[in-house]
Image (tube, rainbow, N blue to C red):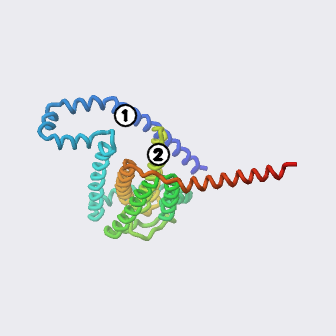
């Protein structure tokens, strides 16, 4: 009963935060769209920028194309590259802290100690169900099923980026575990694990798989509200799976943070590859065979109906 109440309160809080974030995102988007023409005009007319464009027209054009929001290869790709570089530097910083044990040990111990009083048997059993969504077998099944649906709906170009991100994140996770070789925390619940602790494989895999599935579902939706809701739901799921690893005591918090960073990095790679495919002209689909099969089936149905009508004549 108490666990159900806690779950209900948690879902209500998630819903309330989603509403607040949606209103903030919508207001921010509208404000940016309203001010963008003014910013463009200011950029073209500013004396320093105008002088730079006159002296270096080729470089100025390249920079301007990298900042235009109308095309994916403009501002969106530029922001993704900058975010990817930031994540890479942050990840190397965490790896250095973990290998040297400077500062990160105290942080991990404080967070693990904070979770300790809440690890009742009832909560642990419930969290075990959540953390199971990040198992390798579950994630592989999700990728295979998603690939089948995308292929059947003729969205075959984004199947490759999904597999590249999934295989890439699994390879990086395996290499990272062997390189850092961090021991697991002392197990205090029924949850156990045998591989090295850093980074969290559940977190890296869940970030890539559920993040890309959200992208595949939301990408072609016309409603911005639905897009936001799907992205928000996937984000919450990935966060909960990561936190579940710390709650169960099988990972340190820094393992999970590194897992999120690695997963987001490979998500950016997958998004860039998928958007590049969308921008390419697609070859026409040859439906001749399908049309012939449908015509044959229709002809067979008409002949069967004709025979049935003849048999019923007096």
In the rendered image, which residue does mark 1 sit on? 28
Name the spot of residue 31 as percent of width and height, x first. 35, 31
The mark that comes first in sequence, 2 or 1, is: 1
Name the spot of residue 79 as percent of width and height, x first. 30, 45
Q: Which residue does the image show at 43% across and 53% down from the upper left?
A: 212
Name the spot of residue 130 as percent of width and height, x first. 51, 56
Q: Are marks 2 and 1 in contact (CB under 8 Å)?
A: no
> Which of 193 and 5 lies nearest the eye of the viewer?
193
Q: Is residue 22 visible?
A: yes
Above or below, 155 against 48 in this view is below
Mark 2 neighbour density, 10 Å: few (under 14) some (14–19) many (20 or more) = some
Marks counted in the figure total 2
Q: CA distance from mark 2 to mark 1?
A: 20 Å
> Which of 39 and 289 lies nearest the eye of the viewer?
289
In the rendered image, which residue does mark 2 sit on? 218
Q: Is residue 119 visible?
A: no
Above or below, 128 against 226 in this view is below
Q: Is residue 307 left or right of residue 249?
A: right
> Which of 247 and 77 lies nearest the eye of the viewer?
77
Q: Which residue does the image show at 40% across and 61% down from the upper left?
A: 200
Considering every residue shown, the one lying at the far right of the view is 314
In front: mark 2 or mark 1?
2
Q: Is residue 76 left or right of residue 233?
A: left
State which quadrant residue 263 falls in: bottom left
Mark 1 neighbour density, 10 Å: few (under 14) some (14–19) many (20 or more) = few
Name the spot of residue 4 as percent of width and height, x first. 58, 49
The secondary structure type at the circle numbered 1 is helix
Q: Which residue does the image show at 44% across and 71% down from the upper left?
A: 194
State which quadrant residue 168 falls in: bottom left
> Which of 139 and 165 lies nearest the eye of the viewer?
165
Disc sitting over residue 298 in the figure: none
């Amino acid at each position: 009963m108490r666990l159900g109440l806690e779950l209900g309160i948690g879902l209500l809080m998630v819903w309330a935060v989603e509403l607040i974030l949606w209103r903030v995102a919508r207001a921010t988007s509208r404000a940016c769209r309203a001010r963008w023409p003014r910013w463009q005009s200011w950029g073209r007319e500013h004396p320093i920028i105008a002088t730079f464009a006159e002296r270096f027209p080729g470089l100025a054009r390249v920079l301007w194309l990298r900042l235009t929001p109308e095309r994916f290869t403009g501002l969106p790709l530029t922001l993704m590259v900058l975010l990817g570089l930031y994540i890479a530097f942050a990840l190397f910083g965490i790896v250095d802290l973990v290998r040297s044990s400077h500062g990160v040990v105290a942080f991990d111990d404080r967070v693990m100690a904070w979770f300790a009083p809440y690890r009742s048997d009832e909560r642990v059993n419930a969290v075990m169900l959540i953390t199971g969504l990040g198992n390798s077998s579950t994630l592989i099944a999700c990728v295979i099923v998603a690939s089948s649906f995308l292929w059947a709906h003729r969205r075959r170009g984004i199947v490759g980026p999904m597999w590249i991100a999934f295989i890439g994140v699994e390879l990086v996770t395996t290499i990272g575990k062997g390189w850092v070789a961090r021991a697991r925390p002392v197990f205090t619940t029924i949850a156990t694990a045998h591989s090295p602790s850093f980074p969290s494989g559940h977190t890296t895999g869940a970030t890539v798989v559920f993040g890309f599935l959200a992208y595949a579902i939301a990408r072609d939706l016309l409603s911005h509200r639905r897009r936001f809701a799907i992205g928000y739901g996937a984000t919450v799921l990935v966060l909960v799976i990561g936190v579940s690893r710390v709650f169960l005591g099988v990972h340190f918090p820094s393992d999970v943070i590194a897992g999120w960073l690695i997963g987001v990095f490979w998500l950016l790679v997958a998004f860039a590859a998928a958007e590049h495919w969308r921008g390419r002209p697609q070859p026409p689909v040859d439906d001749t065979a399908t049309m012939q099969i449908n015509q044959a089936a229709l002809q067979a149905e008409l002949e069967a109906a004709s025979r049935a009508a003849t048999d019923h004549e007096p």
